[in-house]
Image (cartoon, rainbow, N blue to C red):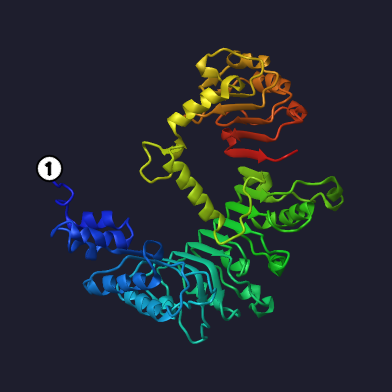
């Protein structure tokens, strides 16, 4: 049998090996003489103590790997994380970081153990690296950045801080970020808050990051002025009750480029109506907002209505720009513990994928499109029995059908959906869009059929070009919880989810 993999050129083999942890990459050296030198040319190094007996073993292999490499070879990506108690590791971290900085490092990820929280201090030489493009730090301490220190990260585009502690709170964050002139992606999560907002310079004198595209702020350690150029903004209002972050919005800058805003109200103690008043007063600062997503776990209560005030002017973004408005109530629960929500979500997704509950689409080369596995769909069809009905299948109809779906066609006439009059207990009415964006739905379906489905709780019909207005009779569907319609003709998408 011919070994075709070994016949591949070194650059291709190195690229394949770059997706593996370095420990496993090193084991390929025993395959044959052909493979023995290849692993030392891989430009991605990934060290994690989960695959080692102990931290000492990890450090030994790491030093051996680094100093066996050709000094002229670059290291494009370096990832170093450990979960065990990091006693006496600071010197090793300094040596390793200084080594990779001299090898034209582009992507650097450091994640020491979280116990103790301030055990590892970031080598400040990182802040002068002229080749870094991606820097991700977690469970680490940033020491005092002196006034005379020049922070120079000229090509850094991605900067993530997670559970990072700043020794000095005066203007270190501001100085750190302003040293990244072309920063595009910023994430600050669970980072120690500022001790005193009075230490901040005047908001009028702060500079915005000019190239910022995406920002995710969880504990609001920076003034909003600095991220006012962002196009995508995620705000987690977790600690508003104990941190005077909302004072920063008293002189809120205009977010002229912001088109996507996600706000998480889920774990703060504000009165529910007061949350919405707070949000409504801020929307005027987002004139080009097109997508608004709000996560909340509390439903409005009647006793809170006394706090509500009718706004004198509708914000510009609501009247002319907004395409998507999504309000999720209790969809994601808050996780307390070592792992972030995103990490838990990634693990759940990987578990579903490994168990073949979902599968990657055949035309997806970037790993971004997934669908329900065919076998799961077949199983769901059998288990659902008489409660679900797919219009195209032409199966027997039953009066107790709860969920109906159908494939959209260029013209969906009333006769096609007339059978729905039989389903008095229908809970879900879903149309599945096709590749074509300009479909038409016979108006009588909305005006006559839909209002008769008194127990309907969900209705979703996107990609119908002619649906630009819903009839007033929709308001009689008192059990309706989820409504999605798309007004393609005017470029506006209305998405609404709540518990009425």
Which residue corresponds to the image point at 57% horizontal and 24% vertical from the top-left? 384
Q: Quadrant of residue 220?
A: bottom right
* Position above or below: 486 against 263: above
Closer to us: 44 or 484: 44
Which residue corresponds to the image point at 64% horizontal and 17% vertical from the top-left? 420
* Position above or below: 296 against 66: above
> At which x and y percent is residue 113?
48, 69
Closer to us: 185 or 237: 237
Which residue corresponds to the image point at 55% horizontal and 25% vertical from the top-left? 383
Res 108 visible:
no
Q: What SS does tag 1 mark?
A: loop
Q: Residues within 10 Å of mark 1 (few under 14, many from 20)?
A: few
> At which x and y percent is residue 392?
51, 18
> At which x and y percent is residue 250?
72, 66
* Position above or below: 118 against 383: below
Which residue corresponds to the image point at 64% horizontal and 27% vertical from the top-left? 428
> At which x and y percent is residue 300?
78, 46
* Position above or below: 183 against 407: below
Closer to us: 308 or 181: 308
The residue that mark 1 highlights is 1
Quadrant of the rendering where the C terminus is positioned:
top right
Q: Is residue 412 left or right of residue 312?
A: left
Quadrant of the rendering where the N terminus is positioned:
top left
Q: Is residue 372 left or right of residue 32?
A: right
Q: Is residue 39 left or right of residue 315?
A: left
Closer to us: 25 or 498: 25
Res 355 visible:
yes
């Amino acid at each position: 049998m011919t070994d075709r993999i070994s016949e591949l050129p070194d650059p291709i083999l190195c690229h394949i090996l770059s997706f593996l942890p370095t420990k496993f990459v090193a084991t390929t050296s025993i395959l044959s003489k052909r493979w023995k030198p290849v692993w030392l040319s891989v430009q991605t190094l990934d060290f994690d103590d989960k695959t080692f007996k102990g931290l000492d073993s990890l450090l030994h292999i790491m030093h051996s790997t680094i100093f066996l490499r050709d000094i002229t070879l670059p290291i494009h990506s370096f990832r170093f994380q450990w979960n065990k108690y990091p006693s006496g590791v600071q010197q090793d971290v300094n040596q390793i970081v200084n080594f990779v900085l001299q090898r034209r490092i582009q992507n650097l990820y450091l994640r020491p153990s979280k116990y103790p929280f301030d055990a590892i201090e970031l080598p400040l030489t990182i802040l002068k690296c002229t080749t870094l493009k991606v820097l991700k730090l977690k469970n680490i301490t940033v020491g005092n950045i002196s006034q005379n220190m020049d922070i120079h990260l000229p090509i850094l585009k991605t900067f993530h801080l997670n559970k990072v502690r700043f020794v000095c709170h005066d203007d270190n964050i501001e100085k750190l970020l302003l040293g990244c002139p072309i920063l595009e992606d910023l994430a600050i999560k669970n980072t120690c808050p500022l001790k005193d907002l009075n230490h901040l310079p005047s908001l009028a004198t702060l500079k915005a990051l000019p190239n910022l595209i995406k920002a995710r702020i969880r504990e609001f350690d920076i003034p909003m002025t600095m991220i006012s150029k962002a196009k995508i903004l995620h705000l987690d209002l977790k600690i508003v009750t104990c941190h005077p972050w909302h004072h920063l919005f008293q002189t809120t800058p205009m977010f002229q480029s912001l088109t996507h805003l996600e706000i998480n109200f889920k774990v703060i103690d504000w009165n529910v109506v007061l949350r919405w008043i707070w949000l409504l007063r801020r929307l005027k600062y987002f004139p080009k907002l097109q997508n608004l997503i709000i996560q909340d776990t509390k439903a409005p209560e009647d006793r809170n209505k006394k706090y509500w005030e009718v706004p004198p002017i509708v914000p510009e973004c609501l009247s002319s720009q907004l395409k998507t408005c999504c309000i999720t109530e209790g969809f994601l629960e808050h996780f307390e513990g070592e792992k972030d929500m995103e990490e838990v979500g990634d693990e759940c997704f990987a578990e579903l994928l490994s168990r073949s509950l979902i599968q990657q689409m055949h035309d997806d080369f970037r790993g971004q499109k997934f669908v329900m596995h065919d076998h799961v769909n077949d199983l769901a069809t059998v288990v659902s029995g008489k409660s679900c009905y797919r219009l195209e299948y032409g199966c027997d109809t039953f009066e107790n059908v709860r969920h109906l779906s159908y494939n959209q066609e260029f013209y969906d006439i009333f006769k096609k959906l007339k059978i729905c009059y039989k389903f008095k207990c229908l809970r879900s009415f879903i149309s599945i869009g096709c590749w074509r964006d300009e479909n038409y739905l016979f108006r009588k379906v909305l005006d006559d059929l839909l209002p008769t489905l008194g127990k309907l709780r969900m209705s979703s019909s996107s990609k119908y070009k002619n649906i630009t207005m819903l009839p007033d009779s929709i308001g009689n569907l008192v059990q309706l919880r989820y409504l999605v319609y798309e007004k393609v003709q005017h470029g506006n998408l209305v998405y609404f989810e709540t518990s009425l």
